[in-house]
Amino acid sequence: MDRCTAFSCLLVAASTLSAAPTKHEVFVHFGKDDFTLNDEAIAELEQFLSSIKLEGDFRFSVEGHTDSDGSYAYNDTLAAERARTVRDFLVGRGVAAHLVQLRSRGKRSPMASNSIPSGMAINRRVQVVFTRFQYGQLDELLDALQEERVQRFIIDPAKDNTIRGLAGATVSLPANAFTTATGQPVKGSVSIELTEALDAMGMVSFGLSTRSGDRLLETDGMVQVAALDATGKPLQLKSSSPMTVTMPANEVKPRMELFLSSTGTDWTVARAASNVTSTADRGIAQPIGLRVVRDLPEYKEDQRGKPIKPSIPVMPKAPPPIPPPSLERPWWGFIQPGKFQGRERRAEAHYNERKQEVEQRYQDRVERYRADKADFPNALARYTVKKAAWDSLKQVEYTAWRKEVYEPAVARFDAVQRSLDVSYDQTLSMWKAQRDAARQAWADTVRTVTSESLSNYVYTTSWLGWINCDRFYDVPEDRKAPVMARTAPGIQAHAYVVFTGMRMLLKMERDDAGGYVSQSVPTTEPAVIFAFSVENGQAQLCVEPVVKNKTPELEFKPSTVAELDRRLAELAGN
């Protein structure tokens, strides 16, 4: 086996129009069954990095390929290893890992014929694309976010065809399935356009939403399939010859249904002529293990015989001074002044007597205050000692309870569970072996999934347009409210409500006041406002938490395409 690594490097600069992205591209070739870089390869990649500047808004795309020898599963793994090798090299030379997008195409995209050795050598490659972005307007930022999410394929409609997108979605088309808009047979080649919006950024970049009328949807990904004949006219699929779409998923969720849309903003459930299953459903059903209900005791503190927790002393306050007397002359005082003067003398004498009593009590309170104030440090020290003793006794009691009551109870439950687990583990091991064998055989047959990603949704439909795998998420109307936000005058932005606990997002629309508003959404689910715009040729980002009955002012900060992608993935849980 030839272990030498061959290289070819091609640098291509894109058109340098005012706001167009600039691209540089390099192809690195590998030996047979090899994914390592030798000294010559390192030198070539060093030269590539020295020709570009790692500043501003940029990202790398690294895509691994193989020749045709070996199974799809083997070549998918080999191509992924080659891509990771190049990614690790870039990261080791100072490129941030989140700026490198990895893809693995296996043997599905040859550049040359695999029928001759030289063609196979060309196909054993990793393609590295460096893209620098600059934007003149918001639409150009959207174009950058949509990059590599739309792919076009030319097929022979008279044959069975399977196409695979960069993000992992596949479409299998039976032979002679297409007709014209008038139902006539198709002549010549057919162009298939596949758009993948499997993650939150893909959905945002195409302006999609997860709703069906007033009802919200929880999604596991969206794709769009379109077909054109050789003259550019749209085609349709026969109802008797539906296509099979496979959509990758980290975890297959229950109750998922197929939804269809022409715009991707409002969806209709496809309850007829379609079918949704998953590769996880293939083979026997997974056995369910028995779990012991652990009714464990709870600790309750026994206060009997324990010291009462002392209250922390409060610094005493000085008593207030005595208020002066208030003698108001009655309205008739001017008629009988002598009588009123006698009344005033009696009131003054009474006030003086009361004043002496009050002053004495006041002096007593002042003395107590001074004594308490002087004793405050001692009182605080006594409290600290008593509290430490109380806490120590409490800890001793809890430790004894845990050792004598709680831990023996846990041990009894665990012993019963272990006996059940032994039998379940044996059954589960046999089931996994049967499931994995069935999955791998099916994957190699239909060529739509890799050995590393065998959890997929599989559905059939004759609809050409946006396709969505969702389930309804309903909440009572009294727990829903619209989300609103304001922006500074003149700012053009796209804003979305993104839920951080589940895969739901809604595009916000402009209101009459120039702000943004969404349809009613659950107020009990955590969510953020994710908005982006363009200013001075650079992407701008704003992330604001959704707070009930609050309308925030969106404040944007400079960002990059990679940062937008990373932040949204973190928020949406991709």
Image: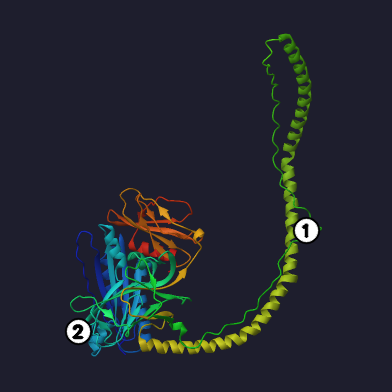
Q: Position of residue 559 (x, y in %)?
A: 35, 58
**Residue 453 visible (yes or no):** no
Residues packed near mark 2 inside 10 Å, few (<14), some (14 to 19) or many (20 plus): some
Given residues 112 and 186, the one toward you in this image is 186
Quarter of image, res 560: bottom left
Instruction: Tell me the amino acid under the disc marked 1.
Output: Gln
Q: Which comes before the other along the chain, label 1 or label 2?
A: 2
Identify the element where label 2 is drawn: loop
- The residue at which mark 2 appears reads as 187
Q: Residue at x 74, y 34 (%)?
A: 369
Residues packed near mark 1 inside 10 Å, few (<14), some (14 to 19) or many (20 plus): few
- Left or right of 106: which side holds 456? right
In the displayed orientation, state which residue is furthest to the right: 305
Q: Position of residue 319 (x, y in %)?
A: 71, 32
Quarter of image, res 470: bottom left
The answer to whether 515 is drawn above or below residue 78 in the figure is above
Given residues 360 and 82, the one toward you in this image is 360
| Chosen colour scheme | rainbow
Q: Residue at x 69, y 21 (%)?
A: 326
The answer to whether 140 is drawn above or below residue 443 in the figure is above
- The residue at which mark 1 appears reads as 303
Identify the element where label 1 is drawn: loop
Instruction: Tell me the amino acid under the disc marked 2.
Output: Lys
- Left or right of 376: which side holds 264? left
